[in-house]
Image: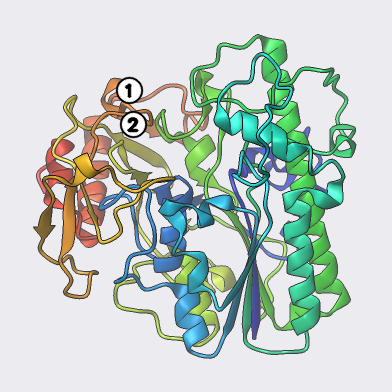
């Protein structure tokens, strides 16, 4: 048996034709939907990038215990479990966070891996002289990104193109072999939306010479024309993603891989493109544009195609699904479900799903309602529990480590005590208390424009929230900061 996962970053389900978008060009996602099961109720777990990938490795939520950081020594990593048990796991990616302090233990869990450089200001090309940077572009990341772009003018040199070429080479080398899982992962369509001209030409829109393809995580302040520009340049990059997905589907056809190769196409989260008057993610509540994700699975064991599934699933289910597919036991600490019977026949796997960002709202959905529980204004107490004290791009400051304690083991730390480090309760990511607690009825208000007040529904969702937090051995202070009886 073989498996391929094609993972995009920040891919919005509402920008795909198979999910009902009527103005983007994504024919290969339509083609994929015809060859697989398309999930209509797939949700994120931990946010953003590396927390989502810890969910993908371990099959359990990251965000209740820790912020952005590496795989921990006690973690059960699905790619590592597989390669230790005879399945060759290979990562081909341009997702540069894997090579930073806060992600540096993920790619080494695969048996082999390769990396394409240049995304989002990746510290790649060394150039002392400043580039000619437009006046509205400031900061070191923008400076580095401008330098990098000068080295990828042709489409073949774009990181996404290189990543999929590496994936194709792996498939061609190993198509006649058994027992491998290829993880092709591109940072696209994550911002900035640097995209070859031919994909812009798919759209009847005058892009002009506006140098604005990197929306910041803040309220919308741009003109309507600038908003349309950003939405269209994002759409052009989504169309590039669609084209490279098509290359994988072409290989599946050419090499007759459908008969014995699972295909999973997924993303870590979505992105606000001016909906709710916001750009981005992390700062604001995780409305469905961010939390409700596209997911497609082809399983050759059941051969189900052209179907949709409305069961509630999450990122944490994917490692359990891959382990089950290869006939490997799921570790006791892995709480995600094997989706084999869900793909084959819509078997339910959960009553409710948690999702969130460390220190922000803790959210829960049952598929109809979404409940976003805000913390107190003080947002305390709050701690990181870790053996790996690194943030996104740096080590923990020594000031953060002055008053560390040792926590008693959690159910999933295999008897290990962890460092207990006070977390910053207010920062650049979010002020969740300022948005307040929100309850939405997706059936009556799918765009989540009008929060509801219903004591009975709120009690039901609080019951879901508390149960799932307990099931995941949430630190007790998480209940305290949310004003809940845990």
SS of the residue under disc 1:
helix
Q: Which residue is mark 1?
A: 435
Q: Residue at x 87, y 35 (%)?
A: 197
Name the quarter where the N terminus is drawn: bottom right
Position of residue 211 in the picture relative to residue 47 (left or right)? right
In front here: 20 or 204? 204
Is residue 365 visible to the viewer in this orientation of the structure? no
Residue at the extreme front:
128
Q: Residues within 10 Å of mark 2 (few under 14, many from 20)?
A: many
Is residue 81 visible to the viewer in this orientation of the structure? yes
Mark on residue 439?
Answer: 2
Residue 32, quarter of the rendered image: bottom right
Q: Residue at x 83, y 61 (%)?
A: 247
> x and y percent of residue 5 in the render?
63, 66
- Location of residue 181 with respect to 468 vertically, above or below: below
Residue 111, quarter of the rendered image: bottom right
In front here: 114 or 257? 114
């Amino acid at each position: 048996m073989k498996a391929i996962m094609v993972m995009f970053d920040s891919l919005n389900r509402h920008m795909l034709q198979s999910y009902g978008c009527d103005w983007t060009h994504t024919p290969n996602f339509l083609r994929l939907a015809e060859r697989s099961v398309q999930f209509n109720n797939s949700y994120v777990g931990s946010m953003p990038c590396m927390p989502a990938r810890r969910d993908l490795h371990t099959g359990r939520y990251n965000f209740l215990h820790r912020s952005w950081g590496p795989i921990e020594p006690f973690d059960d990593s699905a790619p590592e479990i597989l390669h230790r048990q005879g399945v060759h796991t290979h990562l081909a990616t341009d997702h540069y966070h894997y090579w930073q302090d806060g992600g540096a233990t993920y790619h080494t869990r695969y048996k082999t891996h390769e990396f394409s450089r240049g995304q989002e200001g990746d510290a790649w090309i060394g150039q002392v002289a400043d580039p000619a940077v437009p006046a509205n572009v400031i900061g070191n990341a923008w400076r580095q990104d401008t330098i990098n772009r000068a080295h990828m003018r042709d489409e073949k040199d774009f990181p996404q193109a290189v990543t999929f070429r590496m994936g194709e080479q792996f498939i061609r080398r190993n198509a006649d072999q058994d027992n491998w899982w290829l993880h092709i992962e591109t940072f696209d369509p994550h911002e900035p939306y640097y995209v070859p001209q031919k994909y812009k030409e798919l759209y009847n829109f005058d892009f002009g010479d506006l140098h604005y393809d990197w929306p910041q995580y803040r309220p919308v302040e741009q003109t309507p024309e600038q908003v349309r520009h950003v939405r269209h340049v994002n759409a052009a990059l989504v169309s590039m993603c669609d084209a490279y997905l098509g290359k994988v589907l072409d290989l599946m056809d050419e090499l007759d891989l459908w008969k014995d190769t699972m295909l999973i196409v997924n993303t870590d989260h979505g992105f606000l493109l001016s909906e709710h008057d916001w750009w981005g993610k992390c700062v604001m509540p995780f409305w469905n544009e961010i939390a409700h994700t596209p997911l497609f699975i082809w399983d050759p064991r059941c051969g189900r195609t052209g179907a949709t599934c409305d069961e509630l699933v999450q990122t944490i289910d994917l490692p359990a699904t891959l382990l089950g597919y290869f006939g490997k036991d799921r570790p006791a600490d892995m709480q995600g479900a094997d989706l084999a019977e869900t793909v084959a026949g819509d078997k339910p796997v959960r009553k409710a799903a948690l999702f969130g960002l460390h220190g922000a709202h803790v959210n829960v959905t049952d598929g109809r309602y979404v409940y976003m529980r805000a913390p107190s204004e003080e947002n305390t107490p709050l701690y990181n529990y870790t053996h790996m004290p690194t943030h996104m791009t740096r080590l923990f400051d020594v000031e953060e480590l002055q008053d560390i304690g040792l926590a008693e083991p959690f159910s999933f730390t295999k008897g290990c005590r962890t460092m207990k480090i006070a977390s910053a309760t207010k920062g650049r990511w979010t002020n969740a208390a300022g948005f307040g607690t929100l309850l939405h009825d997706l059936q009556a208000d799918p765009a989540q424009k009008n929060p509801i007040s219903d004591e009975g529904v709120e009690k039901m969702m609080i019951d879901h929230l508390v149960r799932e937090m307990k099931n995941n051995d949430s630190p007790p202070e998480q209940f305290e900061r949310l004003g809940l009886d845990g």
